């Protein structure tokens, strides 16, 4: 049996520049962090006492005789890719899916980590990220960028750079006290709306060439944000940049924001938030705001109808919580 723990991520800057259609030509960069909300994947081989050969438990329970009959695309394709058979797998998460936190990619990374381990193999973080990208973007043919898989695998507060040659992950060098201040000034709220990010990503891919100017500016903001984080200037500038990048992003397609989200965003700004953004591809999920401590009570009151979610940054990325080798023969 193997149990893996994989964090969710929040992306601050550069979202959209991690689409191959953009970064293969212009390069791309994002700044993101993982935080202390996780998905747990448990995998073991299924004893041969049942009429079915695989049991996959997530929001539903799937029991199948053949891997090809599994309905969950990522599970089905990952099992084929890894040549997994007779599997019992359970998925649990601290936060809901389709909410802008890269939950599906965290699940795929955690699942692959478990599959390698149950085969007695140790896959490094780069291998897990690349395999997860291959499963989701190639085998499942899902639209979207490639930052989520990398963030979930590596963990931490990082700048991730993309090019036609591949990607690099570089930690943001920031002092402990300054990093704590950043963490404490960020507020996360659940809008209650959920959406399929791949649908919004499809729209974004279609307009990539028409929105090159905006995406290049979002790419430039990554440099500015890194300068703010690593310098001695006020972190208030980080909040202002969040506001600016959100306004750029919401102009890429009309699917990214909604009237309801715009109203919630304005409420937070009017209550004292410096800036913020909707996390993920857009359309719903979690709103993140930069709010100075003396204004946080007022912002919480303004958004009292939303669920407030405290969090702390984490640095581990995907990891194995429990491992017990199994004797298994086809």
Image (cartoon, helix red, strand yellow):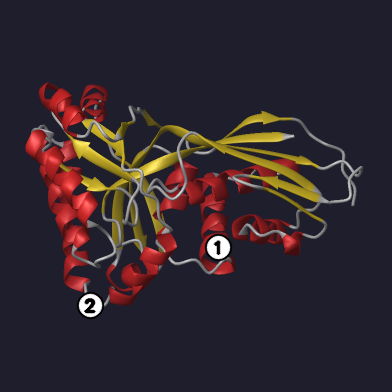
The x, y position of residue 108, in whole percent, is 56, 50
Residue at the (27%, 43%) spot, across then down: 287
Along the line of sight, the residue nearer the viewer: 124 or 56: 56
The x, y position of residue 289, in whole percent, is 21, 38
Please, what secondary structure does the residue beneath circle 1 have?
Answer: helix
- Give the numbered dot on residue 210: 2
Residue at the (62%, 48%) spot, across then down: 112
Quadrant housing residue 211: bottom left
Along the line of sight, the residue nearer the viewer: 313 or 102: 102
Nearer-N-terminus badge (1/2):
1
Q: CA distance from mark 1 to mark 2?
A: 27 Å
Residue at the (70%, 43%) spot, across then down: 89
Along the line of sight, the residue nearer the viewer: 131 or 263: 263
Left or right: where does residue 211 sit relative to residue 153? Answer: left
Left or right: where does residue 259 sit relative to residue 274? Answer: right
Q: Residues within 10 Å of mark 2 (few under 14, many from 20)?
A: few
Direction front: furthest residue:
305
- Whether tag 1 and tag 2 are in contact, CB under 8 A, the answer is no
Residue at the (66%, 42%) spot, across then down: 114
Question: Up-down: is 4 above or below 54?
Answer: above
Please, what secondary structure does the residue beneath circle 2 have?
Answer: loop
Quadrant housing residue 326: top right
- Give the numbered dot on residue 134: 1
Q: Nearer the viewer, mark 1 or mark 2?
A: 2
Left or right: where does residue 128 sit relative to residue 166? Answer: right
Q: Residues within 10 Å of mark 1 (few under 14, many from 20)?
A: some
Question: Up-down: is 126 above or below 311?
Answer: below
Quadrant housing residue 120: top right
Look at the image and tell me whether residue 157 can be seen: yes
The x, y position of residue 80, in whole percent, is 71, 61
- Give the numbered dot on residue 41: none
The x, y position of residue 121, in whole percent, is 70, 44
């Amino acid at each position: 049996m193997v149990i893996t723990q994989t964090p969710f991520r929040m992306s601050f800057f550069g979202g959209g520049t991690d689409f191959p259609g953009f970064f293969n030509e212009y390069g791309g960069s994002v700044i993101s962090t993982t935080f202390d909300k996780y998905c747990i994947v448990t995998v073991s081989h299924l004893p041969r006492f049942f009429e079915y050969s695989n049991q996959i438990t997530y929001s539903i329970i799937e029991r199948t005789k053949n891997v090809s009959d599994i309905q969950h695309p990522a599970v089905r394709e990952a099992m084929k890719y890894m040549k997994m058979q007779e599997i019992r797998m359970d998925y649990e998460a601290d936060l809901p899916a389709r909410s802008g936190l890269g939950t599906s990619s965290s699940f795929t990374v955690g699942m692959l980590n478990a599959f390698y381990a149950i085969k007695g193999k140790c896959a490094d973080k780069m291998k897990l990220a690349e395999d997860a990208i291959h499963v989701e973007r190639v085998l499942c043919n899902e639209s979207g960028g490639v930052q989520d898989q990398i963030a979930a695998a590596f963990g931490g507060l990082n700048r991730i750079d993309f090019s036609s040659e591949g990607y690099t992950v570089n930690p943001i060098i920031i002092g402990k006290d300054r990093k704590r201040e950043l963490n404490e000034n960020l507020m996360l709220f659940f809008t209650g709306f959920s959406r399929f990010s791949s649908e919004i990503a499809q729209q974004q891919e279609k307009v990539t060439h028409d929105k090159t100017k905006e995406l290049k500016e979002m790419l430039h903001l990554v440099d500015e944000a890194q300068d703010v984080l690593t310098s001695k200037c006020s972190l208030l500038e980080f909040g202002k940049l969040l506001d600016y990048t959100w306004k750029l992003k919401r102009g890429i397609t009309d699917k990214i924001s909604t009237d309801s989200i715009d109203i919630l965003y304005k409420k937070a700004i009017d209550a004292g938030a410096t800036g913020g953004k909707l996390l993920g591809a857009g359309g719903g999920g979690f709103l993140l705001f930069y709010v100075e401590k003396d204004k946080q009570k007022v912002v919480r009151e303004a958004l009292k109808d939303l669920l407030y979610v405290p969090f702390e940054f984490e640095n581990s990325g995907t990891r194995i919580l429990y491992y017990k080798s199994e004797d298994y023969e086809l």
